[in-house]
C-alpha cells in the first residue's frame, strides 16, 4: 500500500479515532482541531475521552511519525494533502430538531481558501448531515476538490474496532461518472487494507449516503422504543417482557439485538439523528415518517418519567431526604459520554425532587462533577451502596452486573430495593434447596451454603413477573436471617423490581406475612 497524506479536520470523538486508525493503516495523518487543549492531549497520546484501544494507537502513531495534531495548519499542509476528512460535530440546533452545520461550513470555507484552483484533492465528509448537504459542499468546492460522502457507524466503546473492521463502507459519489470514478479510486487507496479483508463497499449517490447513517440509527431507536412500549403493556397485562423479547428475537427477520427493555437510549447520536431525520422528513413532505420518528422520540423520553415515578412509588411517594444510589452515569458502558444520558437525567430529576442522590460510575464521574455538582459522587460501588434506601442500576457496566445481589443489600442494611438494567438470569442467585450466598458480617465476605428452606435466598430469585406472585417477592428490609423483610404474622412490604432492564415496572404491595409457598425460579 502506498501511504497517502491525509488530514482529519475535527478531532472530537469521531475525528480522533479516525485519525489514529488511518495512521495505524500506514498513512501520514494530520489531525486538525480548533481547541488547543484537545490538540495538546492528543499529541501527548492522551485520549480526551474514554475509548478502549485509542491511547495505544495515539502513542504508536506519534512514535512512528505518522500522526500529528495541530490547531493551526499551514496553507501548504492543506494544499499538499491527498485527502481531507471532515469529522466535525453536527449537533442538534438550538432552535429545532435540525442539525447545526456551522462547524461544517467553517471547515468548507477554510478548504475553499486553502486549496488551489484546478486542484483534484479529495474532500470526504464523515459528519452526519441532512440530505442535500453533500451536493452543497461539492458546489462550494467546485474546481478545487472532489467531494465524496463516507458516513461513519462507530459504537462508543468499540470505535477502534468499528473503524478498522467495519461491517460495511459506504461511498456517496458525485453524479458525474468520471468524477465518481476518480473519487472512488482515491478512497479505495485509503481503505485498501480494509477492502482486501472483504469488507463490503456500497457505492451510491450523495442523498442515499447521507441518509444511511440517520436511517440506521433511527431504525435502532425504533426497536428500542418498541420494546419499551411493549414492556409497559407487559406490566399491565401480567406478561414477561424479557421472555417476550427473547421469543421474538429468535425470528431472523427481527433479531435479538436492541430488544432489551430499559431506561431508554441517549448519547450524542441516536437522539439527535432521529430528530434530524424527522426534520428532513418534514422538509421533504414525508409526513408519516416524521410522525413515526416523533413518537419513537417521545416514547424514549417517557421511559425516564416511568423510572422516576417507579422510584417515587417504591419509597412510599415522598422522595424528600431519601437516600438513593444510581449505578451508572454514562449513557452506555465502555464510555464516559454523559450526553443525554438517561441515568444522569433520572439522577438529576430525583435530586430535584429532594432525594439525596449518590452516583457511581467507573469512568464518567469527572465529567459529572463538572456538569452536575449537586450530586454526590462515589467511584466505589460498595461504598455507594452504604446507607442507600433505593438502588437503581441504570448503566450496564460489567462491574455493576458482577455485583452479587445477595451481598449488595447486606452491605447496605437499609436498602429497600434494587432496580437493575440487567436480566436477573445474569446475576448469581439461589434456588430453594440449592446453593445460596450467605453474608458473613465478621469477615466482610460471603460464602456458599445449602439453602435450608424455600425462603433461603429467595429475595434474588429470578421469578416470572406475574401480578399474582406470592412467594417469589424481593424482600429487602433486613430483619430476617433467611429473607429480607419477613416477620411471621406481621405486616410487610414486598417490592420486586423487575430485572428485565429497568423500566418495565415494579410490583409493590403491603400485606399480611404468610407461610410462603415454594418459590419458583
Image (tube, helix red, strand yellow):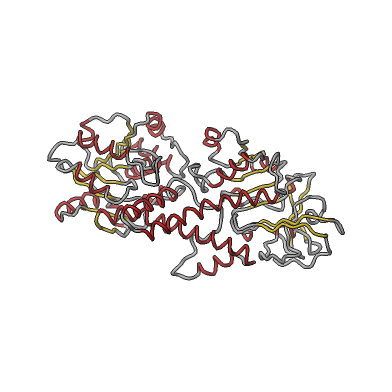
Q: In front: 263, or 317?
A: 317
Which corner quadrant of the image does residue 437 belong to? bottom right
The residue sitting at 62% across, 43% down in the picture is 350
Residue 39, placed above or below residue 269 = above
Quadrant, the C terminus: bottom right
Query: Can you give x and y, in whole percent of width and height, for residue 193 in the image?
Result: 30, 52
The answer to whether residue 20 is seen in the rendering is no
Q: Looking at the image, how many numbered discs can be counted on the residues?
A: 0
| Residue 197 visible at all | yes
x then y, percent, for residue 24: 34, 44
Q: Left or right of 482: which side holds 400?
A: left
Quarter occupied by residue 235: bottom right
> What is the x, y in percent for residue 175?
18, 54
Estimate the x, y position of residue 238 in percent, counting from the top left.
Answer: 64, 66
Who's the residue at 39% across and 30% down the image? 40
Q: Nearer the viewer, residue 490 or 94?
A: 94
Pick whichever, 339 or 412, lies toward us: 339
Residue pushed farthest right? 489
Left or right of residue 421: residue 30: left
Amino acid at each position: 500500500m502506498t501511504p497517502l497524506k491525509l488530514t482529519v479536520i475535527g478531532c472530537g470523538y469521531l475525528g480522533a479515532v479516525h485519525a489514529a486508525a488511518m495512521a495505524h493503516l500506514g498513512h501520514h495523518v494530520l489531525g486538525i482541531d480548533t481547541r488547543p487543549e484537545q490538540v495538546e492531549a492528543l499529541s501527548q497520546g492522551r485520549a480526551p475521552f474514554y475509548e478502549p484501544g485509542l491511547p495505544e494507537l495515539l502513542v504508536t502513531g506519534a512514535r512512528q511519525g505518522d500522526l500529528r495534531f495541530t490547531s493551526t495548519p499551514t496553507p501548504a499542509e492543506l494544499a499538499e494533502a491527498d485527502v481531507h476528512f471532515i469529522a466535525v460535530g453536527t449537533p442538534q440546533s438550538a432552535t429545532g430538531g435540525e442539525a447545526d452545520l456551522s462547524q461544517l461550513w467553517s471547515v468548507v470555507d477554510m478548504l475553499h481558501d486553502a486549496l488551489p484552483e484546478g486542484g483534484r484533492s479529495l474532500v470526504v465528509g464523515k459528519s452526519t448531515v441532512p440530505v442535500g448537504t453533500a451536493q452543497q459542499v461539492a458546489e462550494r468546492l467546485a474546481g478545487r476538490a472532489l467531494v465524496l460522502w463516507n458516513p461513519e457507524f462507530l459504537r462508543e466503546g468499540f470505535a477502534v474496532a468499528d473503524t478498522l473492521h467495519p461491517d460495511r463502507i459506504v461511498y456517496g459519489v458525485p453524479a458525474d461518472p468520471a468524477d465518481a470514478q476518480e473519487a472512488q479510486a482515491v478512497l479505495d487507496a485509503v481503505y485498501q487494507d480494509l477492502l482486501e479483508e472483504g469488507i463490503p463497499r456500497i457505492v451510491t449517490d450523495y442523498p442515499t449516503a447521507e441518509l444511511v447513517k440517520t436511517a440506521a440509527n433511527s431504525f435502532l431507536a425504533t426497536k428500542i422504543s418498541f420494546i419499551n412500549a411493549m414492556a409497559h403493556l407487559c406490566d399491565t397485562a401480567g406478561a414477561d417482557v424479557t421472555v417476550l423479547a427473547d421469543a421474538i428475537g429468535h425470528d431472523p427477520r427481527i433479531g435479538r439485538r436492541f430488544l432489551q427493555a430499559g431506561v431508554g437510549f441517549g448519547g450524542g447520536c441516536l437522539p439527535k439523528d432521529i430528530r434530524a431525520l424527522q426534520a428532513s422528513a418534514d422538509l421533504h413532505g414525508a409526513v408519516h415518517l416524521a410522525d413515526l420518528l416523533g413518537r419513537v422520540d417521545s416514547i424514549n423520553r417517557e421511559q425516564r418519567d416511568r423510572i422516576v415515578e417507579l422510584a417515587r412509588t417504591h419509597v412510599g411517594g415522598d422522595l424528600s431526604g431519601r437516600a438513593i444510589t444510581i449505578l451508572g452515569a454514562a449513557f452506555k458502558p465502555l464510555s464516559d459520554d454523559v450526553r443525554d444520558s438517561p441515568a444522569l437525567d433520572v439522577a438529576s430529576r430525583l435530586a430535584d425532587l429532594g432525594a439525596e442522590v449518590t452516583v457511581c460510575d467507573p469512568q464518567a464521574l469527572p465529567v459529572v462533577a463538572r456538569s452536575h455538582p449537586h450530586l454526590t459522587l462515589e467511584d466505589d460501588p460498595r461504598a455507594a451502596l452504604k446507607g442507600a434506601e433505593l438502588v437503581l442500576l441504570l448503566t450496564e457496566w460489567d462491574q455493576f452486573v458482577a455485583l452479587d445481589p445477595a451481598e449488595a443489600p447486606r452491605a447496605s442494611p437499609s436498602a429497600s430495593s434494587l432496580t437493575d438494567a440487567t436480566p436477573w438470569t445474569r446475576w448469581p442467585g439461589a434456588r430453594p434447596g440449592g446453593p445460596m450466598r450467605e453474608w458473613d458480617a465478621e469477615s466482610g465476605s460471603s460464602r456458599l451454603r445449602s439453602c435450608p428452606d424455600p425462603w433461603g435466598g429467595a429475595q434474588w430469585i429470578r421469578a416470572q413477573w406475574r401480578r399474582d406472585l406470592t412467594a417469589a417477592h424481593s424482600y429487602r428490609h433486613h430483619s430476617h436471617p433467611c429473607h429480607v423483610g419477613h416477620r411471621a404474622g406481621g405486616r410487610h412490604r414486598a417490592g420486586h423490581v423487575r430485572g428485565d432492564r429497568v423500566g418495565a415496572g415494579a410490583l409493590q404491595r403491603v400485606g399480611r406475612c404468610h407461610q410462603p409457598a415454594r418459590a419458583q425460579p
